[in-house]
Image: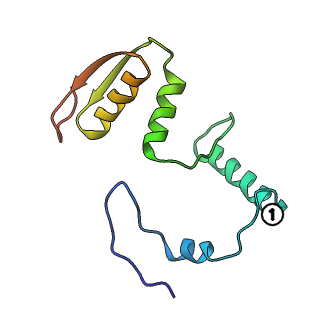
Amino acid sequence: MIPTKKLVMIPGPVPVSPSVLQKLGSEVKAHTDPDFVAEFQNLLAELRSITNCDGIAFLLAGSGTMAMEMAIANLAGEKDKVLVCSNGHFGDRYISICENRGLDITTLNAEWGKSVT
């Protein structure tokens, strides 16, 4: 039995449920294993279902910053005009990502804890 952990209310790392920890202790399947392929295809189908997506679903391993960078890369082309609303660290990170991509940025800032209006 795996002992319970403290509840940590931060973006990450997050607590892992005992059932997940137990599954992590099982045999690792290769990405070419038919059982893995079937489980992965099922996971993608469920992801499309819960997001109401008819297109292709992608699962990627990476940080939250990677997800932010992918969002900008897929939504804005070079020299596009972008409005970034920022009221703290993650909004400021979007500003940095957009600057690094050479986008034409307009920022709308608010103090931490305040809504951007």
Colour mode? rainbow
Front residue of 7/103: it is 103
Above or below residue 32? Residue 64 is above
Identify which residue is drawn at 58% across, 42% down: 51
Q: Is residue 83 left or right of residue 70?
A: left
Give the position of the C terminus as an image quadrant. top left
- Among the 4 quarters of the image, the one containing residue 48: top right
Which x, y percent locates residue 116? 22, 29
Q: Residue at x 48, y 19 (%)?
A: 76
Which residue is drawn at the image coordinates 49% and 84% (left, top)?
2
Q: Is residue 78 above or below residue 74?
A: above
Q: Residue furthest right?
A: 34
Which residue is tagged 1?
35
Give the secondary structure at mark 1: helix
- For the residue marked with disc 1, what is the amino acid? Asp
Horizontal and vertical percent position of residue 97: 39, 29
**Dot 1: within a 10 Å radius of its alpha carbon, few (fewer than 14), some, or many (20 or more) residues?**
few
Q: Residue at x 29, y 27 (%)?
A: 85
Residue at the far front in the pictured view = 100
Number of numbered discs overlaid on the protein picture? 1
Relative vertical location of residue 16 with respect to residue 67 in this rendering, above or below: below
Residue 74 shown left or right of residue 33 in the figure: left
Q: Is residue 105 left or right of residue 101?
A: left
How far across and down, in percent of the image, does residue 102 sit? Answer: 41, 17
